[in-house]
Image: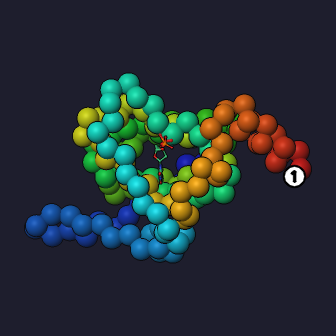
């Protein structure tokens, strides 16, 4: 599995910095939903799921946190600590976020509305789905 970073163009001048994100441009899909995670308590892990179909772009717009990505075969850990980069999270990637700094704001752009039926929240179920996909290829 490779980490899919998307580097954003930082528009800056002597007043400071600005990043603009457009769908199908910096964001590689049509944006149907934006959510953000903030005020996360110490030692909390979030995520702990995969999506059957949803595609997301995760951007740490303030502070820092760690993200682990697992495609069923390999697992990677990434430090998210800049608003100038996004991480693409494709479908069927088990992801967990942890070690949030107190000031962390984690923004996520998604290509569909919230749907609980798109979630796989059980790791064994995720592994089974991965194996079925692998065996059918
Ligand atoms: P949850 O799925 O537990 O967050 P995470 O897995 O990222 O740690 O979401 C917390 C609650 O918010 C849960 O009741 C579902 C709800 N929710 C929405 O209503 N809309 C959304 O877009 C998201 C991401 C969550």
Judge whether 1 appears above or below 30 on screen.
above
Regarding mark 1 in the picture, which secondary structure is present there? loop
Left or right? Give the position of 113 relative to 10: right
Location of residue 55 (image quadrant): bottom right
Residue 90 location, x and y as percent? Answer: 61, 54
Residue 24 location, x and y as percent? Answer: 51, 75
Left or right? Give the position of 98 relative to 24: left
Location of residue 21 (image quadrant): bottom left
Residue at 81% across / 40% down in the picture?
131
Name the residue nearer the viewer: 79 or 123.
123
Left or right? Give the position of 125 relative to 9: right
Name the residue nearer the viewer: 118 or 12.
118
Which quarter shows the N terminus?
top right
Looking at the image, which residue sits at the far front? 116
> Can the viewer see residue 93?
no
Left or right? Give the position of 84 relative to 18: right
Residue at 46% across / 63% down in the picture?
33
Q: Report the residue marked by disc 1.
A: 137
Residue at 51% across / 39% down in the picture?
47
Judge whether 82 appears above or below 26 on screen.
above
Is the CB of mark 1 within 8 Å of ligand 1? Answer: no
Colour setup of the view: rainbow
Label 1 packing within 10 angstroms: few (<14), some (14-19), many (20+): few
Residue at 15% across / 63% down in the picture?
16
Judge whether 127 appears above or below 56 on screen.
above
């Amino acid at each position: 599995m490779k980490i899919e970073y998307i580097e954003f163009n930082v528009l800056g001048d002597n007043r400071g910095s600005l990043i603009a994100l457009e769908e199908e441009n910096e964001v590689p899909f049509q944006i149907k939903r934006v959510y953000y995670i903030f005020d996360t308590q110490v030692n909390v892990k979030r995520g702990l799921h995969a999506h059957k179909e949803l595609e997301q772009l995760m951007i740490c717009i303030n502070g820092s946190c760690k993200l682990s990505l697992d495609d069923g075969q390999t697992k990677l850990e990434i430090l998210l600590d800049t608003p100038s980069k996004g991480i693409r999270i494709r479908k069927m990637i088990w992801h967990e976020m942890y070690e949030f700094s107190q000031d962390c704001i984690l923004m996520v752009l998604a290509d569909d509305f919230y749907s609980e039926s798109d979630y796989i929240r059980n790791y064994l179920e995720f592994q089974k789905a991965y194996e079925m996909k692998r065996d059918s290829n």
